[in-house]
């Protein structure tokens, strides 16, 4: 992936500029260090092992602590905060179940390279390994799903560890870092030093691309007849959208984005061919299949993008830019690997490349666009999911932060909302975590209070973390929650229809769904419902006018609508199914 935006770590003098006591206990030192590195929001839930930290937070006014209702949701909220702001999300939980409840959220962040620092309480050091009350080896449990993790055994190392944790989480290929804090370390006194900028000799991500490789890439693009830029999440995480847009426009090269790359290139630009992959546009998938030079920018050739590997982009020479060398060549062999920060590498390619002759290529792509557009079924009586997304896009002028859960609604949102701005589409891509959408949207709203945040979710996914309505109401978060209610697990039902002879085994929710309007109202939120297109517009208009609390919109959509185009499992990208026929 790409170089992340690093949070400021120290002041101009690399020392704290405020008067400080000579001696602090570990909990007080932790809070002082977080203030110095400009942490403004923590998503947390108290418990015995972290009570010293919560005591230190009692009189703290510079850090906003958000009391979430479940630790998993806290991790998702920190994830959403990080994706929307570019800063590391911060989680604080207690030992044992507090830590283990964050695991799904940590894995979600790890798969999508999201910077997050998770502080977990731990039993006192002398009890570690004794199966003490609320003890869990959270360092061992999370080692495969964190970029790095720490167990603090000496309070004198705590400040160094905290600063390192944020440096590691936000630099290079970003990711989650966990810091495990035994309770005795929080009560032990130590001196606060205001450390200088962190440098880890064994951790030096390569940011500058190799000049020879950059020259070769520029030459290859210049000679291409059918070039294509394939932009992934690294284009967003690395804040390379301006460089990407400038190069694509100057060279007039089509751009396709992954799910994580949405917003990294404005979809209203003529060079955009939309998202590719399993539910990508016909023209993006065909462009990938037929191109002769492929420039991958901060993407990892995920299986949902490639389809069957032996049919993936078979005619192209491949250039791959990524800050993580382990990503290059992992899934697809490439001809010109470039290890480096995409924001720094792209301008070098742009400066040395000449505009290729793509007139015939564009004629082909535009023909695909005309003959195979994304379809929006029409109905005057039933809300079609695709229309629901388009109307949300129109009501928000395409300027909202859109956060989705996982399933059909996620793919329809990716297809039919027009994303022109970076950090505007947040979704669990790699892990596909149901229950992610609502708490992540809440985190985004805390991070970007001046922007409209819309959570597009399904009736199944929403119920996994609906309890966070209590948090959203308590903090008066003006979220717009749009439930695509088809009374089933939509993507599961679609696969059962297409590949399991319509044997809908445990995927129908009709009898068990709550009344979402009453559920919202029971928490103190606003509940609205629409059952037809006219009511849908009325509900959206009402929801957009409410700014002091969350709004839950229950949209009753067509139950049996399927999400197309679709690349079936085991098929190549050009073997799409375009409809029920």
Image: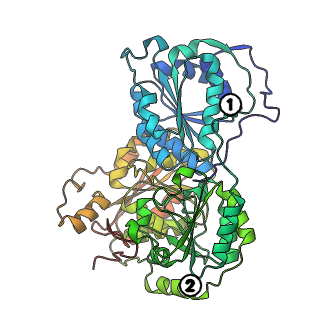
Does residue 94 appear to the left or right of 346 in the view shown?
left
Q: In which quarter of the image is residue 311?
A: bottom left
Q: Where is residue 228 in the image (x, y as percent from the top left)?
A: 56, 73
- Front residue of 562/252: it is 252
Q: Can residue 552 be seen in this view?
A: yes
**Of the residues tagged 2 and 1, which is closer to the observer?**
2
Q: What element carries label 1?
A: helix
The total of numbered circles placed on residues is: 2
Does residue 474 appear to the left or right of 16 in the view shown?
left
Q: In which quarter of the image is residue 189?
A: top right
Q: What element carries label 2?
A: helix
Q: Where is residue 566 in the image (x, y as percent from the top left)?
A: 36, 70
Q: Position of residue 144 (x, y in %)?
A: 44, 38
Identify the residue at image location x=19%, y=64%.
500
Q: Can residue 524 be seen in this view?
A: no
Disc 1 marks which residue? 35
Residue 16 lies, with reference to residue 220, above or below; the image says: above
Q: Which label number is shown at residue 159?
A: none
Identify the residue at image location x=18%, y=56%.
505
Badge 2 density bin: few <14, some 14–19, many ≥20, Cα 10 Å? some
Q: In which quarter of the image is residue 561?
A: bottom left
Q: Which label number is shown at residue 361?
A: 2
- Front residue of 182/517: it is 182
How far apart in space, not on screen, are marks 2 and 1 (Cα)? Answer: 53 Å
Quadrant containing the C terminus is: bottom left
């Amino acid at each position: 992936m790409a170089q992340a935006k690093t949070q400021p770590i120290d002041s101009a003098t690399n020392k704290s500029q405020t008067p400080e006591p000579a001696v602090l206990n570990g909990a007080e030192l932790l809070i002082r260090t977080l203030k110095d590195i400009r942490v403004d929001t923590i998503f947390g839930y108290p418990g015995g092992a972290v009570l010293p930290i919560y005591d230190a937070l009692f009189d703290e006014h510079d850090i906003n602590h958000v009391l979430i209702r479940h630790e998993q949701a806290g991790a998702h909220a920190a994830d959403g905060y990080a994706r929307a702001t570019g800063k590391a999300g911060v989680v604080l939980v207690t030992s044992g179940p507090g830590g283990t409840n964050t695991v799904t959220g940590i894995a979600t962040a790890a798969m999508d390279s999201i910077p997050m620092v998770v502080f977990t309480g731990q039993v006192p050091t002398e009890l570690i390994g004794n199966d003490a009350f609320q003890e869990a080896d959270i360092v061992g449990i999370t080692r495969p799903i964190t970029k790095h993790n720490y167990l603090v055994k000496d309070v004198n190392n705590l400040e160094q560890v905290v600063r390192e944790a944020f440096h590691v989480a936000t630099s290079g290929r970003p990711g989650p870092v966990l810091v495990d804090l035994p309770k005795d370390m929080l009560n032990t006194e130590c001196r606060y030093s205001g450390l200088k900028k962190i440098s880890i000799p064994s951790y030096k991500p390569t940011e500058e691309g190799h000049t020879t490789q950059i020259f070769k890439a520029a030459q290859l693009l210049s000679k291409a007849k059918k070039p294509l830029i394939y932009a992934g999440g690294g284009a967003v995480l690395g804040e390379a959208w301006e460089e990407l847009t400038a190069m694509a426009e100057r060279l007039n090269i089509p751009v396709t984005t992954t799910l994580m790359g949405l917003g990294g290139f404005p979809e209203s630009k003529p060079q955009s061919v939309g998202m590719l992959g399993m539910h990508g546009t016909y023209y993006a998938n065909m462009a990938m299949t037929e191109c002769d030079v492929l420039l991958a920018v901060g993407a990892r050739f995920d299986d949902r993008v490639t389809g069957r590997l032996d049919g993936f982009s078979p005619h192209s020479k491949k250039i791959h830019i990524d800050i993580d060398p382990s990503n290059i060549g992992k899934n697809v062999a490439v001809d010109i690997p470039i290890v480096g920060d995409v924001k720094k590498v792209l301008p070098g390619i742009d400066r040395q490349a000449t505009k290729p002759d793509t007139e015939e290529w564009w004629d082909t792509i535009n023909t695909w666009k005309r003959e195979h557009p994304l379809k929006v079924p029409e109905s005057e009586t039933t809300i079609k999911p695709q229309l629901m997304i388009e109307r949300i896009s129109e009501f928000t002028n395409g300027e909202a932060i859109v956060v989705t859960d996982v399933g059909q609604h996620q793919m329809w949102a990716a297809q039919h909302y027009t994303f022109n701005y970076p950090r505007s589409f947040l979704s669990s891509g790699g892990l596909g975590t149901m229950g992610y959408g609502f708490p992540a949207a809440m985190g985004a709203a805390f991070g970007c209070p001046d922007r409209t945040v819309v959570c597009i979710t399904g009736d199944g996914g929403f119920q996994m973390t609906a309890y966070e309505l209590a948090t959203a109401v308590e903090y008066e978060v003006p979220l717009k929650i749009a439930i695509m209610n088809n009374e089933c697990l939509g993507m599961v039902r679609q696969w059962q229809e297409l590949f399991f002879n319509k044997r809908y085994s445990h995927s129908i929710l009709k009898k068990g769904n709550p009344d979402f309007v009453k559920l919202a109202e029971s928490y103190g939120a606003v509940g609205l419902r629409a059952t037809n297109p006219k009511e849908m517009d009325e509900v959206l208009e009402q929801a957009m006018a409410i700014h002091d609390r969350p709004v839950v919109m229950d949209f009753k959509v067509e139950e049996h609508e399927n999400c197309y185009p679709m690349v079936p499992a085991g098929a190549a990208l050009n073997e799409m199914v375009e409809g029920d026929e």
